[in-house]
Structures are given as C-alpha cells and as structure tokens.
Amino acid sequence: MNPAASIDGNTYLNDTSSLVDRILERHLPADQTPPTTLHQAMRYSVMAGGKRLRPGLALAVFEYAGGDGKKAPDTIHKAMAALEMVHTYSLIHDDLPCMDDDDLRRGRPTCHKQFNEAVAVLAGDALHVLAFDLMAQTGSNRAVLELAEAVSTGGMLGGQIADVEAEGREVSYEEIKSIHTRKTGALIRGAVRIGAILADANEELLARLTVYGERIGLAFQVIDDILDIEGDEKLLGKEVGSDSKNQKATYPAVIGLEKSHDEARRLINEGLAVFADEEDHVLKFLARYIGQRAY
C-alpha cells in the first residue's frame, strides 16, 4: 500500500479527468446511434466537463489500497464511468424546473434547456441504467450493492426528497446534516468504498476509508452551500444565489456563514486524521482540495 505521488488535489483531478473522459467516450453510446436525441442528450451532459471528483476518488483509493492495475480496465475504469454517469444523471434531474429550475450547468445550458424536459428526464434515466450495467460488468456484486445504497432512498434520493420538503421552512442542524449527508455525501462515500472494494481492501482499511469518505463528502456539500453565497459564477459554471432564491435548506441558513466555514474545516481535518501517521499522498491532497474550494 504505497502512497500515491505527491501532487496537489487539483493537479491530480486535472490529470485524471482526461482519463475519465476517455473511459466515458468508450462506454457512452455514439450520438448518431438511434435513438439519436436521447444519446446526444446523454453525451451533452456527461461530456460537459467538471472535475470528475467521484471517479477520481475511486481511482485514487483503488491505487492507495493496492488495486491490480492490469485489471483496471475491467474493474475500476468501468466503476469510474458508472460513478460519473450516476452523478450526471442526478444533476440533470436536479436542474429540472420541478426541482431547482437551473438554466446553467458547468457553464452552459442545462440539459432541459438545450433539449427539453422530457428528453432531460429520459437522459437521466438512461444514464442511471447504463451506470448499473457498467458496475455489474466489474464482476463485483458488492460494488453494485454499494452503488445502489449510495443512490437509494437511504442515500442520494432520500436526501433529495428531504431537500425538496425542507424548502421554505426552518430546519435544525441535525436535519440539514442528514439532508447533506445523503444528498451529496452518500455518492462520494460510495465512490471511496467502491475503489477500496475493487482493490480487495481488508475490512479494517475499508472502515478507515469509509470515515474519510463520509467526512469529505459532507464537507463538499457544506462548501457548495458557502460557494452559493461567496462563489464566482464564472468559476462555478452555474448561477450563484440560487439556494436563497429557492429557499433551500443550507448550512449558512441554519448555522450562519462563519460557522459553516468552521464546520467545513472540521470535517476536512477529520478526514485527514484517518491518515494522521502517513506521509502526504493523493487522498490527503484531495481532501485539502475540497476544503480549499471555499478559500
């Protein structure tokens, strides 16, 4: 179990994103393959860019845990594509008028603006199905179940409905923590665990990495809340202030902006504490990268 090369998290993700794009190109249907409109919408959304954090985390954990690089194209690479497709499907649906009603995503029109609402719904559905197809091709039932748990009503979907139901009303600290842990944190936690599972990590290591995934996953959404107030729209690629406009339940709305910064720092530090006795490696850099997004 050798630490990865000492590069910062942003550089790692930039380097990894080109690999993720090649993997996605390999597994997405061609845009001229019928039904062409659906496949074009899938590709439009998936290939819109982004940091590819979830597949990047899965790969970093796989390598950290000693995964077999020769098996990567059949295991972790397919899992990486699946994770990015699930993430993209969630964004397509999240942007719909019945949800957050956003016009921009990653600096360009959202899927329902570029196509229409019906196509956007179906593109998200199709990506969801393809993601599970690819995860099943890894040959790991446990990885498939891990993805299902991350997306389930106990994970991302449960967090999303709780988020919708919390709009326009006061929520407690425990409630906002629960919403964010499920809505965003669950898939990041799942990406970390899937990387470890496909590397055949032992249960002790898997448990440690799970703590890391949980802390940085929640921190990511806390920081997203902060950036919706303090962020640069050009850098974010989406409208800022939409949470307030939509009366969303956010950490700054519940505990204030200063305490939200404190909470994000605490969570990142707890994630880093998993590797307290180790030299710097890519998982530590990725945690710091997530934390530095707000500073």
Image (tube, helix red, strand yellow):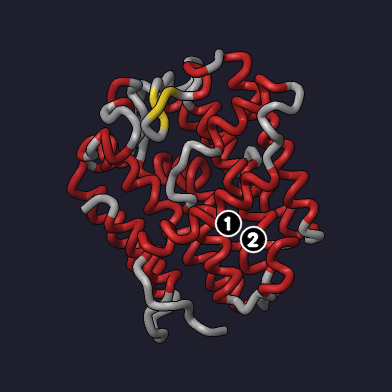
Residue 56: give its label: none
Q: Residue furthest front?
A: 32
Q: Residue at x 42, y 64 (%)?
A: 12
- In the rendered image, residue 231, in percent from the top left (x then y), is placed at 23, 39
The quarter of the displayed image where residue 128 is located: top right
Q: Is residue 99 visible?
A: yes
- In the rendered image, residue 78, in percent from the top left (x then y), is placed at 69, 54
Q: Are marks 1 and 2 in contact (CB under 8 Å)?
A: yes
Q: Residue at x 26, y 39 (%)?
A: 252
The quarter of the displayed image where residue 102 is located: top left
- In the rendered image, residue 82, in percent from the top left (x then y), is placed at 65, 48
Residue 54 in the figure: left or right of residue 176: right
Find disc 2 in the rendering and name its residue.
194
Q: Is 291 rendered above or below residue 45?
A: below
User: Three-letter amino acid code at disc 2?
Assistant: Ile
Q: Is residue 203 visible?
A: no
Q: Residue at x 43, y 49 (%)?
A: 51
The residue nearer to you, when weighing 219 against 92, is: 92
Q: CA distance from mark 1 to mark 2?
A: 5 Å
Q: Is 13 rendered above or below residue 49?
A: below
The quarter of the displayed image where residue 210 is located: bottom right
The residue nearer to you, when weighing 167 against 288, is: 288
In the rendered image, which quarter contains the N terminus?
A: bottom right
Q: Residue at x 39, y 81 (%)?
A: 276
Residue 191: give its label: 1
Residue 133 in the figure: left or right of residue 285: right
User: Three-letter amino acid code at disc 1?
Assistant: Ala
Q: SS of the residue at dot 1?
A: helix
Mark 1 nearby-residue class (10 Å; few <14, some 14–19, many ≥20): many
Q: Is 36 rendered above or below residue 60?
A: above
